[in-house]
Image: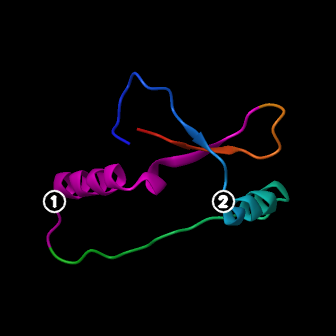
């Protein structure tokens, strides 16, 4: 879907895997993913920031958040622009 500031965000149901993870989170069991990497050699902070921004803009999963709606047991996925 192309970004469009005039469109309301769409909400999607969780997959079965996401639902299981959400149930674990509500029980106090954290569900996290972390990455640590070492960059050797010369670094250009501006170029690195542009690269990360580009990757995030290309992959919806990196812009996906879970939002709850009152009266609904499970949250919905919302993809941010």
Query: Is residue 65 magenta-colored?
Result: yes
Query: Relative to 27, does residue 67 appear above or below in the rendering?
Result: above
* Disc 1 secondary structure class: loop
Identify the residue shown where x is 83% and y is 44%: 73
Q: Earlier in the sequence, mark 1 or mark 2?
A: 2
Name the residue carrying label 2: 15
Q: Position of residue 76 (x, y in %)?
A: 66, 44
Placement of the C terminus among the 4 image quadrants: top left
Left-right relation of 53 to 26: left
Identify the residue shown where x is 33% and y is 76%: 38
Identify the residue shown where x is 67% and y is 53%: 14
Q: Position of residue 79 (x, y in %)?
A: 50, 43
Q: Which residues are magenta?
A: 42-69
Alpha-carbon span between mark 1 and mark 2: 38 Å
Name the residue carrying label 1: 44
Query: Relative to 37, does residue 43 appear above or below in the rendering?
Result: above
Placement of the N terminus among the 4 image quadrants: top left
């Amino acid at each position: 879907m192309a970004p469009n500031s005039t469109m309301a965000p769409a909400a999607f149901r969780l997959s079965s895997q996401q639902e299981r993870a959400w149930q674990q989170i509500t029980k106090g069991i954290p569900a996290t993913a972390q990455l640590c990497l070492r960059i050797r050699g010369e670094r250009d902070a501006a170029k690195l920031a542009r690269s990360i921004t580009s990757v995030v803009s290309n992959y919806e999963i990196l812009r996906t958040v879970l939002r709850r709606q009152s009266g609904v047991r499970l949250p919905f996925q919302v993809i941010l622009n």
